[in-house]
Amino acid sequence: MDNKSVKIIPLGGLGEIGKNITAIEYKDEIIVIDCGVSFPDEEMYGVDLVIPDITYLLEREDKVKGLFLTHGHEDHIGAIPYIIKQLNMPIYGTKLTLGLVESKLKEHNILDISTLNPVNAGDIVQLDEIGIEFIRATHSIADSCSLAIFTPVGTIIHTGDFKIDYTPIDGLVMDLNRFSTLGNEGVLLLLADSTNVEREGHSISEKVIGETFNRIFSGAKGRIIVATFASNIHRMQQIANASIKENRRIAFSGRSMENVSKVAMELGYLHIPEESVIDIDDINNYPNENITIITTGSQGEPMAGLSRIAHGSHKKIEIDKDDFNNKYLVIHSGIDKDDLFIISASPIPGNDKIISRVINQLFRKGVEVIYEDLEEIHVSGHAYREELKLIHTLVKPKYFMPVHGEYRHLKHHSDLAIKLGMDQKNVFTLETGQVLEISEDKAVTSEKIHTGVLYVDGIGVGDVGNIVLRDRRYLANDGMVTIVLAIDRNTYEIVAGPDVITRGFIYARESEDLIKDIKDISRMAVEKYLDDKVLEWQVLKSSVKKSVEYHLYNKTKRRPSVFPIIMEV
């Protein structure tokens, strides 16, 4: 690395939605921007979270000076507890962002070993060679910031997630003046949010949603159940405002919703009168028309509040349709046909089908559901094309690198920068692991470093890898066959079995012929070696496995996982 060069190292978040983490390295200093999770797709059976692999940072642990957070969304802070256990570094962020981080660290019992440094918009954290300024931004969560990173090579601006909202709920508009000032002073590199680059025009202000809620709430006759992102505090505030206007009490449902709302109210970011908030256990003490429930599950997550309600597995809120009359609801917790469900979120890419299933299930229950296609009940927290153009125009960077988005988003954002007048050779569309190195006279993609993912499954981190996931896919697709038999080591004879157990492959009682085939083939495969006095366990197991797999594929065109269990007695 050139002594007078700075490296931008994307460890996650490029070519994907989520898992945002970027390192910036100059000489003996590395700063880390954000540290998020992504959520597993349908083929990652049993996986709870996906977190970034930080091998690059671990190998340079002595250089890492701090973690700088742009805002408190899961795809930017969700991996912190897992990463801090590997690499403990000071954490810098605004009050709300650190409040949410603190809650996570408490849950993992590592708060006492963590160093949290609160900052305000406008503050500068000065290291030996690098300075980091927090610049107020607007997004779908309060206390969001962009970052200006001052290096001896030049100034780098990282927008974080942002939209340009001229009428934000908290009245704190994005500090465009600071972007303009930095642009006039000269910006070396711009890293900018690309999520909504495909959307023309300007994003809608969050305030519009409040007007929609007021109208919908004024006509509602029963309980209102609103599913939204737990981190969208501005959205919660507007739901609360509309509820209070209609004399409704507010209950929060879902662990993340309860945690975030508690933190936000304690820190003064969510303003709800104490008497208007009730515990979810107390919802039956009030008339239906006086209750609003704010719940998790806007993405159709099977274990979240909305999905549990829809499928009748929620412990506190239950709806069920009478068998004899589709229009009447059996009252388990006071919820009836007048209930109104609002899904105040748009699907994360890939979640469309899951959300549709939940919506359909709610309609089957006989209740009314309002979602994005029907009403303006959600606006994006990410900048549309015109907002991106404004940032580019204000900043006037020498180099540009799009971040935060799938590859198509990054490509379209690069094209936008070129259309705005940037030289194509100064625009870098990279993927995770590709390093951009900038010196005083040039910028190049220098190397490809090791990056990857770690899977979180229960309390295990990294113990589920690609091999395990492959096996889980096989089991999910074709099931399993277990063959158990016992061999007398003295006589070289089978003394018990073979017994066959199947799961997810066939229904044994209706497939007696096939089960008999498996037993016969297994016996023959073992006896072939026993006749030659071979008791090598691995040889016997492999013989059974191959013979049975071959037969089952010929008979069924399926490939169940075959597990021979051979015991010596």
Image (cartoon, rainbow, N blue to C red):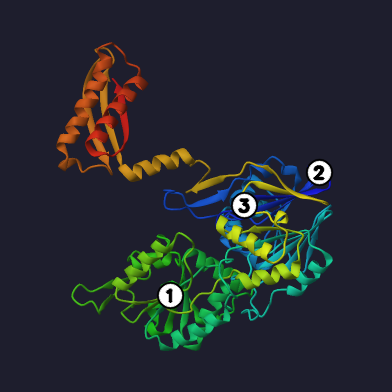
Amino acid type shown at disc 1 = Asp
Q: Nearer the viewer, residue 181 or 296?
A: 181
Q: Quadrant of residue 193?
A: bottom right
N-term-proximal mark, 1 vs 2: 2
| Callout 1 secondary element | loop
Residue 379 point in image, percent of width and height: 53, 74
Query: What residue is pinned by disc 1?
Result: 373
**Residue appearing at x 31%, y 29% in the figure:** 564
Residue 138 point in image, percent of width and height: 65, 72
Amino acid type shown at disc 2 = Asp
Give the vertical position of 246 relative to 378 (above or below): below
Give the vertical position of 96 relative to 106 (above or below): below
Q: CA distance from mark 3 to mark 1?
A: 43 Å
Q: Residues within 10 Å of mark 1 (few under 14, many from 20)?
A: few
Q: Nearer the viewer, residue 83 or 362?
A: 362
Query: What residue is pinned by disc 2?
Result: 2
Q: Is residue 167 left or right of residue 46?
A: right
**Residue appearing at x 42%, y 41% in the figure:** 470
Query: What residue is pinned by disc 3?
Result: 110
Residue 451 point in image, percent of width and height: 61, 44
Give the vertical position of 545 relative to 4 (above or below): above
Q: Is residue 336 left or right of residue 186?
A: left
